Image (cartoon, grey):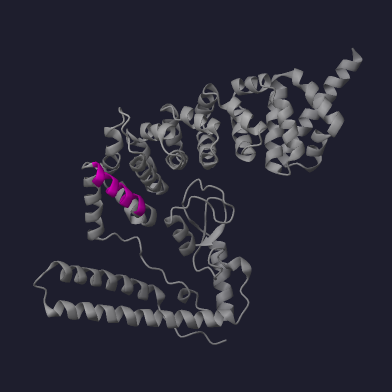
Amino acid sequence: MAKTEMFNAGDAAGRATELKRELQRLVMSIAEDEDYSPETIDRARDALLALRELGTRRSSARSSSLKLLGSVSCPEDFRCPLSKELMRDPVIVATGQTYDRVGIQKWLKAGNRTCPMTQQVLSHTILTPNHLIREMISRWCKTHGVELSELVPCTDEDQITEGEKDKFLSLLGKMASTISEQKEAAKELRLLTKKMPSFRGLFGESPEAIAQLLNPLSAVRSSSSVHLDLQEDVITTLLNLSIHDNNKKLVAETPSVIPLLMEALRSGTIATRSNAAATLFTLSALDSNKELIGKCGALRPLINLLEEGHPLTMTDVASAIFNLCIIHENRARAVREGAVGVILSKIENRSRVDELLAILAIISSHQKAIEEMALLDAVPCLLSIMRETSCARNKENCIAILHTICCSDRTKLKDLREEEKTYGTISEICRSGTSRAKRKASTILERLNRAYNMSHTT
């Protein structure tokens, strides 16, 4: 099969970037210099024409490849779930799903923090090349005469310009100005850090930038004169910054960040409080940050917000608490701050059962948590969840918690014995649960049988 006309997409993308920068420089020169020369206009016109010609050639080459691609059946696994087109550079996100790099980067640059396919919150935004799928696509393209490099040319969109750096510094300077200028600058920084990864990166290059961003909130922290709209824009900008993996350590270790996030959890608008929780979740991707956030006392306002139960905050709050409790020290802190009672109350009301069971399971390794669950009569609630749910992970978490409770308090075996006698719930887990759930259920049944035999031999 004849291949399409060769066109070096990589060189073309690099040339396009050069032309755009040159054009930007020339236009700025014309706009700012009253004595600009006719030669400057001619050079700007030539750059525009060259960019137009390059775009025409790229469109023609891509159209040719896509026409050829349309004549053969492309395997569904080779198409990006977002664009539905053949993937040029397949990458894996934190949830294990594969997307084309261009598509998922656009998704992340828009400020999204979830996996498009699973809707799970991403624990990080690192994109890992999927070499296996890339090689399979490459072989398929060679077999069918498709030039893969022509399909989705890449450009260096993250390159920062001097003009953007100047704008960045100007906006930060306004954060120490009048309240009206602060609000204007905060709103623009929120928008720029959402849309442009380059602006997120600039904060990492400027050691004092984050403190400057937070200046309006730090200045009024001891008073009640916080402007809620300003607070929302600043906290949301902080969230946008924390998505950038290289910023996570710097953001968390800036002294005023965690205290201001905690204040936002307590006193901000619903959107602010949700974004503050999401920021803590994103920052806690690093273990060192988990410890720092826990030591600062952030679990208390998170648990308070969880107890309030506003629908718009629950996902971010639960995600933050779960992530923080991955380290043992924070499990103890969460238990001391009343997490067990709050979580059980929400589960009994069938609110966010999936997320909250996961938190309850992870803190159940703490002895004090188990004692509280026993006192709060958690066993009937967990058993009812097991009967109702079709989710294997929820059943696994329930049986794991019940196993720990029974190992600690033998009096709870009576409830399990009645459950097994009436519904056969635990035996069902032994037959159809996950491998971990089967092990836990089997151990519980052994304990029930042993207790039964002992009671009938004495």
Q: Residue at x 75, y 21 (%)?
A: 412
Q: Which secondary structure class fits the magenta region best?
A: helix
Vertical comparison of 268 with 50: above or below: above
Q: Position of residue 79 (x, y in %)?
A: 57, 68
| Residue 180 drawn in magenta | yes
Task: Give 89 or 308, whichever is nearer the viewer.
Answer: 308
Vertical comparison of 144 with 28: above or below: below
User: The magenta stretch spans which residues?
Assistant: 179-191
Vertical comparison of 382 with 147: above or below: above
Task: Give 170 or 426, whichever is nearer the viewer.
Answer: 170
Check the picture and name the quadrant holding the C terminus: top right
Q: Position of residue 185 (x, y in %)?
A: 28, 49
Q: Residue at x 11, y 77 (%)?
A: 37
Q: Position of residue 394 (x, y in %)?
A: 68, 39
Task: Give 267 or 171, whichever is nearer the viewer.
Answer: 267
| Residue 90 drawn in magenta | no
Quadrant hosting residue 385: top right
